[in-house]
Amino acid sequence: MKIIWNDREPIYVQLYQYLARLIVEQVIDEGEALPSVRDIASEQRVNPITVSRAIQLLVDDNIVEKRRGLGMFVIEGASATLKAQLRQNFLSDEWPNIRRRIDLLGLSVEQLLKDTDL
Amino acid sequence: MKIIWNDREPIYVQLYQYLARLIVEQVIDEGEALPSVRDIASEQRVNPITVSRAIQLLVDDNIVEKRRGLGMFVIEGASATLKAQLRQNFLSDEWPNIRRRIDLLGLSVEQLLKDTDL
Amino acid sequence: MKIIWNDREPIYVQLYQYLARLIVEQVIDEGEALPSVRDIASEQRVNPITVSRAIQLLVDDNIVEKRRGLGMFVIEGASATLKAQLRQNFLSDEWPNIRRRIDLLGLSVEQLLKDTDL
Amino acid sequence: MKIIWNDREPIYVQLYQYLARLIVEQVIDEGEALPSVRDIASEQRVNPITVSRAIQLLVDDNIVEKRRGLGMFVIEGASATLKAQLRQNFLSDEWPNIRRRIDLLGLSVEQLLKDTDL
DNA sequence: GTGGTCTAGACCACT
DNA sequence: GTGGTCTAGACCACA
């Protein structure tokens, strides 16, 4: 699956989010290996070093661990942990701002729920 | 009022959003002058050039106009125009992504909107 | 001052240690800017990106902060903080191992500390 | 006995240090055979090739010799030799650095000797 | 095979 | 001026 890049955020951040999503959705399950840096790099047509940076973010989050010479593996329990982390971040950091803006713009609940189909 | 900066977005964008908000809320009403670049710069402790860039965004949006020798003035009708613009941008660009993320995290949009009541 | 590199550790780690040392010794004092990435890079004859990685470690440690467009600045109180961190790490992680090895080799810690006097 | 790995040093080096220690402490005495590569590999859950590399370091140090068809044996006098080698390396290479860092961190002899009990 | 590091050089955003 | 990002390609250590 090819990622559709936006140019506001660095590629490595978008790649991180993409991988995080695969883990949360258990497309890559706990205990499994991520695709190798080289494979991701060639599939997504980006530089291997950029892939490494993305994966490093997952390592910093304790979501993925290196097994030397073997590859990067999803830690047991990571899916739930990651989901909880992301949820926490969203609720504490982002949602309050979003909520404030919704109010500021005077948007109604109906308008927001309308285009239900995505 | 001192802006609380975040690290992710450029200062001039945050400044723009701050000024836009003042206009939407009619803290600075139509026909009134914005504070001078110098005043904003010293109050918010940023570079005057950065302030200029923020104001330029408002000029580009037809929200503010320069009256030479006098300063920058909020155009008549700007509050409503700006609000409509921001609303449009929010609904078409941001909200779909936000909804997708909320779903991914297993949260309910309805619940969120209800819990953090208007 | 030119760093003497060893080839066991990555350059960016050695650079980090070098900068950390300058801060602990207050050669670069609190509130001051680090030399620019470009300057360090050309002085030490390494790639700017390598310098960035080193400085990023200091940012992660809350020792240094970015002021956008201006450079990287030593946070107030960083010298003491950093010293305390390094001291803590040394005592808890490294020193026990070192002592164990000294004992294993049949050497005396007391003697070593005394012989190489302060 | 299961080795507790650290992430900083290569596994084969850690394995080498572990075996060296067994020899210095004469847990494996002079003239005795090391456990087989296969046994070490399965006990420590590492790749046999990695074990081989560790043992090769001991061979390079003249601490262990291969007796074809029989296995790897600790050479007579190896315990003392090895101890002397390690001591030499420690004093010339490592201790000066450690000493310098202790001074830099302003650690006192009392602090260093305090947690005597390991 | 795996990931980690580094360089050279380019381009961008920000102040 | 400042730092951040990315690429292409090379080399290394590890298992």
Image: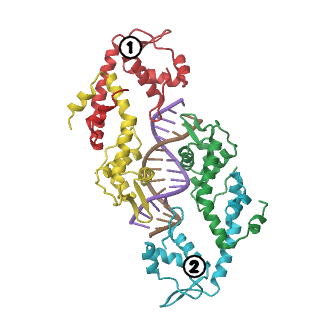
Chain colours: A green, B cyan, C yellow, D red, E brown, F purple
Q: Mark number for residue B58?
A: 2
Q: How many C-alpha atoms fall within 10 Å of the one at disc 1: few (<14), some, or many (≥20)?
A: some
Q: Position of residue D73 (x, y in %)?
A: 43, 12
Instruction: Assign a secondary structure to mark 2.
Output: helix
Q: Position of residue D79 (x, y in %)?
A: 34, 15
Amino acid residing under circle 1: Gln
E5 w.r.t. B63: above or below: above
A84 w.r.t. D1: above or below: below
Amino acid residing under circle 2: Leu
Q: How many C-alpha atoms fall within 10 Å of the one at disc 2: few (<14), some, or many (≥20)?
A: many
**Which residue position is annotated with label 1?**
D26
Q: Chain of mark 2?
A: B
Residue B83 visible? The answer is yes
Q: Point out the image quarter for the C terminus of chain C.
A: top left
Left or right of C116 in this view: A65 = right
B89 w.r.t. D48: above or below: below
A32 w.r.t. D56: above or below: below
